Image: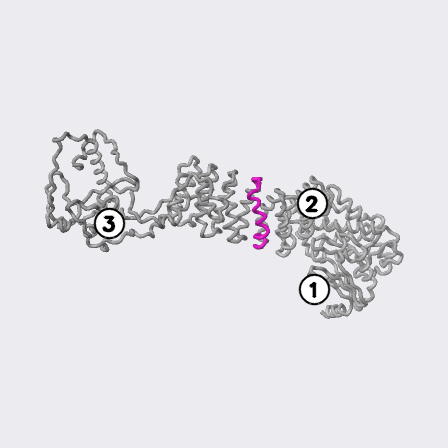
Amino acid sequence: MDFLKSAVASISKGPAFAYSFGDRVDIDQSIWTLHNGTKREDGSKCSIFSFDINANRSRLPLAKNALRKFKTLRHPGVVKVLDTIETDQLIYVATERITPLNWSTRRKALSEESLKWGLHNVAKTLKFINDEAASVHGNIRASSIFTSESGEWKIAGLDILSSMKEDDAVIFTQGSLMPDIGRYSPPEVVKTGWESVRKNPTHAVDAYNYGILVTEVFNGGFSGSDQVGSTKNIPLDMQNSYKRLTHAAPKMRLSVAHFLEQGTRSGGFFDTPLIQLADGIDNLGLKSDAEKDAFLSELEAVAESDDFPEDFFKVKVLPELLKSVEFGGGGPKSFALVMRIASKLSEDEYDTQITPVIVRLFTSPDRAMRVCLLDNLPLMIDHLSQKIVSDKIFPQMVTGFGDLAPVVREQTVKAVLVVVPKLSDRVVNGELLRHLAKTANDEQPGIRTNTTICLGKIARNLGASSRVKVLSAAFSRALRDPFVHARNAALMALAATADIFPEEDCANKMLPAICPGLVDKEKMIRDQSNRTLNIYLERIRKYSTTLPDTVLPPPETASAGGTRMSTPQPSQQGNQWMGWAISSFTNKLSAATGEIQPNGTGAQTPSDRVTSPPANGISSPPPGLHHTASASAVPKATSNLRTTAMAPVEDFDNDDGGWGNMDDDDPADAWNTEPAATSSTHSSKPSVSYDDGGEPDFEGWLNAQAQAKSASKKPLPKGLAKKTPAARPAPTSRTSTVTSKPSIAAPKTSKPVETKPAPVEDEDEGWGDAWAD
């Protein structure tokens, strides 16, 4: 902490440093102190090497040499430098975020595949230093190797890195100042000092140190010179080349370049999928379509294995794949790999790297890319906010509902299930339903079937006001679909959504729509219809137990002069069809008063008849009798069944070709197949009595038959006609109670009654003459 305080104080007095110090990272065998850091401008991660001049002045030449080499040596295998600062008291080097390799090798946390990949990276970097740069690193060991955020091994520890073209190179004069350098020095340096480096091949020192590095990473550490050349834990295919790296004679040592060449041969120890992947990803944009396809197939196989570092895929492979998908024509195959790798990203990483690319790709006109996006939508939907889905993804996605390619329309319908939870109620019940109404009428049977399935699964996301109307119309239409799987999907959807429909709709609409499936030509439909029907019947039966036994008023509430009805008891229901359902008069004998009038014709006198109002509801008084107010007050003895108003019955339209006009303002109207009656029509109609469909009652029918019979008979000659007896005058006592002549009312019908009599068969000839006379 004291060092950090002094460092911060020194920075405040010296030139500005654009990076902030974080936690200290423990490293050994180094003259530097390592800290995690962040860039003040954007908060990006970095690492900071710091050297305190006052505390370690004797090694200042090594720190200055490292600072100079960091600035001039640029290679992907060398730790990337972001910024440096040098004062009289300190030296800072800000680099990319790195982690000491020792943290992993000592715990043996890396697989053999990853170790080979790391050694391959170091070998390529050393080849560059020895051959192209004509320099000697002189400090290759595990403590000078770091791993980047992508998992790649990077070389640091440039304290004694020297060019062999320099006569006063630091390695010759200051090489012995490196911490613990004696254990890693080759035999010739141990014997004659660092001046021997001039006399031997440039690669000699680094090849020997590289051999020690191989031992160190495969064994988790290096104990001393007695371990050099030991093949313990070294891969079998690498052992022969490894021994030549650590040969005692400098001129007999295998250079790192030759070691790399032997390893990368076909079947060599560096010929591994991960190494091939790492080499190919850098040149992905330069590959032909065939080469790119082959490479992506290999990459897909590698990504499925658990032996490869995830960080490499996230940091190194993912950005290259995103470039290929968006700009290099990588296509759906590249995007599928992107989604697989992106599933391992954090939310912040996903929002930064993946989300912007997804939004841009949805605007692409490429059908193959659109299908790939829709296929992978379940992998990305949890990482996308509701605002992004509603404002940017869904408006582009709905264009697929009307695409000319059936596969795009079908994948768009399937993707609805994924995006519905992220859409607002207004969008779901408006725009989305209008598009689904169109796909439900699609020419492709598979798309119609999937639309029905989709509606069944999003039923509970629909608005309560339009849910029943939309689903009943959609499922009823699908039940009439000629495609067997579409009908089956409708039946299964009805079974899954049975609790959504009111019980009245279940009985009046759903059951009539389901029943035709019971006699379908396909057994699959018949079986599913039975299962679905049982679900609805069970629900209706359960609901019926909650209904009252009757809604008719009890007999006690009737007026004194009114009719009396007998209500069947539950215990009599088994045999009540054999008895009389309704009695209009009391069944007590004492109630039958008066005498039966002797009338030869069997006709009742006017006072004994029960008046029946005419069809027009107006009774006209007979001649000689005055119409009084009391005469019209005689109640009609009728059954309550005939005074109950009938509600209009909705017609189930089986010939409807669609769910309505798709251009209606109300989205729910697009699913309505039944014409809606206007409110003015119902409100203007008066309440009418029960109409039995236009058929006259029994008494009226007999009267009509008698009148027709009389009309059909030829009139008798004059003098032979029957004399009609004079009507008996009504008693005075009766005229006070009966003041109007009863008339036989025409049967009340909702349809006009034809006056022409129906033909009567011969066997019935004259059987109703007595009723006519």
Query: Where does the N terminus fall, quadrant-wise?
Result: bottom right
Name the element at disc 1: strand
Q: Is residue 575 visible?
A: no
Q: Earlier in the sequence, mark 1 or mark 2?
A: 1
| Image coordinates for residue 525, horizontal then vertical, percent | 44, 38
Q: CA distance from mark 1 to mark 2?
A: 39 Å
Graded by Cα atoms within 10 Å as few (under 14), some (14 to 19) or many (20 or more), the crowding at tag 2 reads: some
Query: In the image, which residues are magenta?
Result: 386-407
Q: CA distance from mark 3 to mark 1?
A: 92 Å
> Which residue position holds label 3?
567
Q: Is residue 358 magenta?
A: no
Residue at (78, 48) in percent of width and height: 243
Label 3 is placed on what type of residue? Answer: Thr
> Which residue position holds label 1?
22
> Which residue position holds label 2?
328
Graded by Cα atoms within 10 Å as few (under 14), some (14 to 19) or many (20 or more), the crowding at tag 3 reads: few
Query: Where does the C terminus fall, quadrant-wise?
Result: top left
